[in-house]
Image (tube, grey):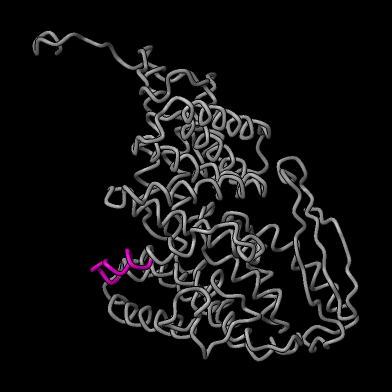
Amino acid sequence: MCNRAGRVCQGYAAPPDRRTREVRDARTAKTNGGALNIVHRGQQQAQSAGLIHVVDGSRVGLSRMERDYLYSFRSYTAAQCAGYNFDPFWQVLVHQVCESCPEVRHAAIGIGALHRKFANPSSDRNDIFPIRQSTKAMACLRVAMMKDRQSDPAATEKILVACVVLVTFALFQGDVDAIRCHLQAGTKLLWEWRKKNSKSPVASVLLHTFIQLHIHWASVTTLRDYIGGEYPYLLELIHDNLDDISTYADEQSKATLLVIVQAWSIMLNDPVLLDQMAGNLSQGFPWDTPANKVHRFHTQVAECIVVHQKTACPTKLRAFMVIQIQVEMMKIVLASSTFSGSESEWDTLFPHFQTIADTAETLLARFDQLPDPLFCAKEGFLSALMFCGLKCRDWTVRQKVLTICRKYNRQEGMFSTANAALLLQRIYDVESAGIPPGEKIPESSRIISLLIVEHPNYSQFQPKTHIKYRDQDGNWYSEWLSP
């Protein structure tokens, strides 16, 4: 047939040798539910046929393990990091920059390895491998910053992309020092770069991505990094971000991106000192109150749901449910700003807590046929669900939150259902000691404050979680919790 067509015969593919590692790995991935099959089918077929497999330029110089995890990142992890909405950074930009930037490439390989470790916790894994990739990425970044001209906008774009990927890696690792270092330097660099490159095609993408990172970090650090003025350019960047979002004509896009408005409640205002009736003049935004912002955002989301609920695809409907959870959380933050300090005051917010728990349960059960963002780099619903489990003292709601955290394996940046279940169970044991199930927890038994103690790099090698909590008498207790 080849002779008749005038083609050079390439031979016939031999049946795969079942003794090869590729076939064994593929069989193992299949038995594990196909969570992450990092065997490249084209490579496997070429090898079994005795042909030379030509790899793309970005994979030259990488070890076999690095190539496998890079393929894993491109095929699976990047889409997971995007979360519940299409994200041009994780699904377009990072792949383009990864082709030519070893600093981004090695950081992406490290995230791919973390994803594999998370999706297959019982499999054999090299715990030090992701950290080595992060170290390689940092070394390559230092070389790039010394070699490239700082006045070159294209070079700065690549550095900003590398910064985002390194911050994300540190979030998954729980490396608080690395997060602060990269986020502070990246935010300052973004501010300077946007002065002359605001019309760049990637300027809007980078702006949205950095603000999302700040929102997630603010929810983790409870304003500690933001009260002291560590990010002097952040207010202006958030304002520019909202202006940029407002130019979107499509209502669906506007609704999914306007979730950034929660930054007004989380970062720009201290919930304890927030005055809902007065404009926030000190922050430079005198035309609107935080309560008005949240109300307007809630109205926009409600209108979008009405418009799209019959025509939107399941993926977009699922994204709307995540937004609804975040809206409920914003209402809780605003309402709590008037509290005097008694833990019993949280009981008045029971309808919001119940809505969060019910919506999260529906979100996870109804859309199980869709690709599931198990390993997300952005704020989703876990922080709201965890807060709900801590502050709501209703026995039914607490058990529902605990069941969700134990049943579903999810990670959103520094939040994970595994750690949430561990933390919540300990707090429930302390607060409900000697109290029958279903009975109201008295004020004297309630935990006032709780925090996860920060240890630089601790989560890279230490599987235990260090927590501190304070009772009604002001006594602090410190414990290490094991998974």
235 is within the stretch colored magenta: no
- The spot of residue 211 in percent (x, y) is 47, 59
For residue 221, above or below residue 164: below
- Quadrant of the rendered image containing residue 9: top left
- The spot of residue 116 in percent (x, y) is 57, 40
At x 30%, y 69%, the residue is 246
Tag count:
0
- The spot of residue 44 in percent (x, y) is 42, 23
The magenta segment is: 242-251
249 is within the stretch colored magenta: yes
Nearer to us in this view, 207 or 195: 195
Image quadrant occupied by the N terminus: top left
For residue 284, above or below residue 406: below
At x 42%, y 19%, the residue is 60
Asked whether, in this view, residue 457 is left or right of residue 432, the answer is: left
For residue 168, above or below residue 429: above
Nearer to us in this view, 328 or 16: 328
For residue 436, above or below residue 324: below
Asked whether, in this view, residue 450 is left or right of residue 221, the answer is: right
At x 63%, y 44%, the residue is 178
Nearer to us in this view, 317 or 247: 247
- The spot of residue 339 in percent (x, y) is 68, 88
